[in-house]
Image: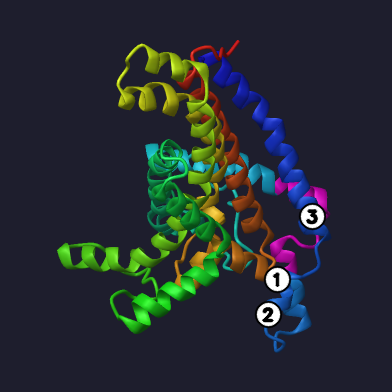
């Protein structure tokens, strides 16, 4: 397994390099100018100096190589220096945002906790609810629970987050006044009261996102479980007198998880950017909000850094899914 993992990671490098080239080329061809956001009162000379400082006057391939060097060499050395107190990156130019002139990785580090706390928690809750929901819905196929779960899943899957978010804000924040409608990113959890405040402001965005995740994954789980329950090994297990709970857990659930693992793995990187709409609705200052502001300002270094983080996460989560296949089904070999 170790050799398989190393081989997959090695072959992921050219894939990530190709993705960076494609993204850079698309951003180069896209309309827009970083200088367009500046006030009109700034003189042409100052604009030219700022353009030169950002490196916009250089050829595209030079800017790409510089960006790639900063992202793949300088920023990892900065991380090593921060962890071990070394000076490997001393004097090396860091990857800076064109919009704020701050290091891009610093911006990502500031936004990442907000995204992980809200969107990541919503994804975990959605997966943990969707799996037993799909299993029980398949086991009770055609019953009242199955029909109710199917209807709720179809509704949750069809209703977009901006609509469900607006409805929940109207109901719980405006009408009932139970929960805040805007996420306070400056809140620091120090005691019990601040913890309650944090949980209250997380409730609505987590609910919106977990509803969508639950609706999507529970449908796949139900379909996979229905397919597993119709297999001969389920009939054989029941014929041997195995308890129904063991039949569901050890035979039905374990085999039906294999296709669902792929859906969960592919959807996991979306916690960093796929919830852009929800972050905008509730004012969560996360990675999605940073991506939106970077696109509006044509901040190419930040856009590319976020894109590469997402691409890397997709590769890593797909690898984790492949490793999980072998754990769920020992017949799958890594040779």
Q: Determine whether 303 is above or below 318 in the image.
A: below
Tell me the magenta residue range.
51-66
Residue topped by disc 1: 50
Q: Which of disc 3 and disc 2 is earlier in sequence?
A: 3
* Mark-to-mark CA distance, 2 and 3: 23 Å
Residue topped by disc 3: 26
- Judge from the rendering whether residue 60 lies leftward or rightward of residue 92; answer left or right: right
Q: Are marks 1 and 2 in contact (CB under 8 Å)?
A: yes
Residue 128 at least partly seen: yes
246 is within the stretch colored magenta: no
Residue topped by disc 2: 38
Q: Decide whether the magenta segment is chiefly helix, strand or loop.
A: helix
Q: Secondary structure at mark 1?
A: helix
Q: Are marks 3 and 1 in contact (CB under 8 Å)?
A: no
Q: Secondary structure at mark 2?
A: loop
- Judge from the rendering whether residue 181 lies leftward or rightward of residue 29; answer left or right: left
Q: Which of disc 1 and disc 3 is earlier in sequence?
A: 3
Q: Secondary structure at mark 3?
A: helix
Tell which tag, 3 or 1, sits nearer the viewer: 3
* Mark-to-mark CA distance, 1 and 2: 10 Å
């Amino acid at each position: 397994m170790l050799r398989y993992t190393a081989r997959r990671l090695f072959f992921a490098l050219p894939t990530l390099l190709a993705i960076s080239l494609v993204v850079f080329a698309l951003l180069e061809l896209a309309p827009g100018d970083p200088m367009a956001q500046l006030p009109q009162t700034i003189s042409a000379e100052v604009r030219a100096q700022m353009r030169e400082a950002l490196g916009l006057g250089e050829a595209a391939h030079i800017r790409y190589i510089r960006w790639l060097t900063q992202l793949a060499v300088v920023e990892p050395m900065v991380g090593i220096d921060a962890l071990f107190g070394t000076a490997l990156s001393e004097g090396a130019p860091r990857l800076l945002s064109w919009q704020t002139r701050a290091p891009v990785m610093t911006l990502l580090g500031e936004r990442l906790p907000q995204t992980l706390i809200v969107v990541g928690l919503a994804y975990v809750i959605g997966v943990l609810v969707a799996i037993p929901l799909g299993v029980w819905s398949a086991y009770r196929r055609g019953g009242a629970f199955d029909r109710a779960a199917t209807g709720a899943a179809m509704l949750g899957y069809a209703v977009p987050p901006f609509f469900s978010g607006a409805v929940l804000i109207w109901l719980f924040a405006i009408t009932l006044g139970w929960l805040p409608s805007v996420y306070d990113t400056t809140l620091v959890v120090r005691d019990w009261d601040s913890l309650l405040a944090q949980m209250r402001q997380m409730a609505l965005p987590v609910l919106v996102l977990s509803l969508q995740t639950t609706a999507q994954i529970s449908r796949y789980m139900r379909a996979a479980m229905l397919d597993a329950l119709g297999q001969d090994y389920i009939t054989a297990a029941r014929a041997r007198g195995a308890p129904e709970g063991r039949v569901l857990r050890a035979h039905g659930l374990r085999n039906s998880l294999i296709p669902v693992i792929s859906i969960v793995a592919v959807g996991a990187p979306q916690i960093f950017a796929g919830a852009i709409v929800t972050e905008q609705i509730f004012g969560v200052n996360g990675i999605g909000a940073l991506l939106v502001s970077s696109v509006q300002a044509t901040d190419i270094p930040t856009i590319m850094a976020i894109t590469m983080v997402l691409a890397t996460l997709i590769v890593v989560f797909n690898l984790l899914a492949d490793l999980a296949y072998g754990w769920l089904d020992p017949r799958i070999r890594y040779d």
